[in-house]
Image: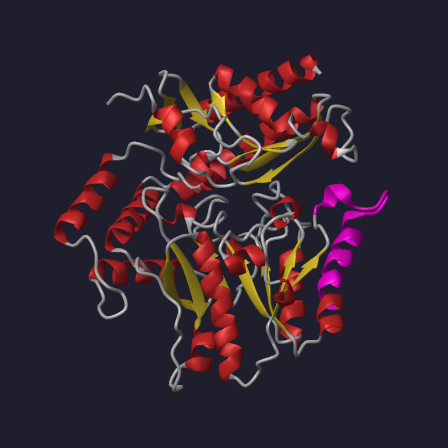
Amino acid sequence: MDNTNAKQWDNDHFLHPWEGMDTLGKNNRTLVEGASGIHVVSDEGNKLIDGPGGMWCTQIGYGREEMAEAMADQARQLAYFSPFSNTNSTAARFAREIAKRAPGDLNHVFFTTGGSTAVDTALRFVQFRNNLLGLPEKKIIISRQKAYHGSTYLAASVSGKERDRLWLDKANELTHFLPDVNPLYRAQNQSIQDFLNEKVADLENAIQTLGPDKVAAFIAEPILASGGVIVPPEGYHKRCLEVCRRNDVLYISDEVVTAFGRLGHWFASKEVFGIEPDIITCAKGLTSGYSPMGAAILSDRLIEDVAGQDATFSNGYTYSGHPVSAAAGLKSMEIIEQENLLEHVQLMTPIFQNRLRELSEISLVTDTRGMGLMGCVQCSETGDAQDDLKRDYQLGAMIDAECQKRGLVLRPIVNMCVFSPPLIISEAEIHRMFDILKAGLLAVSKAN
């Protein structure tokens, strides 16, 4: 295929997510034309380690023939069914397999098109349930600064990344944001324990100020992924769940990034953070990125509150439970189990996190943080995390550019680089990835 004009077509016709209007039509994006294992290949033939794992999603790696075959077999047999009036055994089987792995009594799977629509579905169900329970005023959703939950209307409304809230309207009357939970920005001389107490108190105080009769749910990523891989202090989620239970506030765990192996477990909520939420949202690793799909997983308790009532949960999507996506999800799940990838992630995590922490020795680096196979390197020209962000706005992109020269693509976010490679990454490949990242950081450090 002739791709000579592809970059021009991209600028002329492909309006990308998070498209900057100041550079519209003038971008020089890398053309990714192939991939295998943990690598993507550019149109120029450059082989690059995929540091961000696509968009936190390529759990089993690229080029899996068995995935292509499973999806093709399903497409040949049944490419589509209407989830509004029919059902399908592949989708039903996938729902059952997800429910078996979800914690507690989360047994009801509502399939969506991705993470944003999974979050929208969760929030709409919360509203629906409270209406049926005679609680029409109990609708406020508490979220957090730096949180990212999606770009559909309700999901964007509960997302707390400040730069994403500048130009688009949100349902501000439905949301309340808690302060940043990043321990890096705790008060001088404040202990982690005191910071933890403060963050839990933020939630309790918000519920009491807004009114328990007005607050419907608290939504939280176990780790704030796009916000910069922010890991709240240990015990935060467990104590927040206790606060929610005392105040009849539902707990939504947004596991769009952390589910399906990123932290070494099918779901991180219970196995890593010790909680059984009321709703879990997931996507990304659900199909290892081979086909679009998401899900909101609801607890038996919530379903029992609405079952049997003369009401319709009028929320859904043309592609809910899409059979080809379900086939991809089932095969991805099978590969993860057959190749013991959850155990592999647990073995690789100490190596990954140790190499990540070593980067803090570089003067440009102000913080390194992560968990499982998730990491973030935060930088500043002065080496001061409290420095003016305007000065450091392009640092992430500069580091990514230097790393791409050496064979690694990252995800730059302002002054941060985040990464979450495919779960199949080997020990040798981890070292190779961090060797390149270190070289890229040193190159930018010298240039500044």
Q: Position of residue 266 (x, y in %)?
A: 43, 51
Residue 390 in view, yes or no = yes
Examine the rendered structure and indicate whether residue 391 appears above or below residue 405. below
Q: Nearer the viewer, residue 165 or 245?
A: 165
Magenta residues, as a range? 182-204
Is residue 181 one of those drawn in magenta? no
Q: Position of residue 125 (x, y in %)?
A: 47, 71
Q: Quadrant of residue 49?
A: top left
Most prominent secondary structure in the magenta stretch? Answer: helix
Identity of the residue drawn at 52% across and 73% down: 127
Q: Nearer the viewer, residue 324 or 371?
A: 324
Q: Is residue 72 left or right of residue 52?
A: left
Examine the rendered structure and indicate whether residue 411 appears above or below residue 254. above
Identity of the residue drawn at 74% across and 41% down: 184
Q: Position of residue 158 (x, y in %)?
A: 59, 58
Residue 358 in view, yes or no = no
Q: Quadrant of residue 80?
A: bottom left
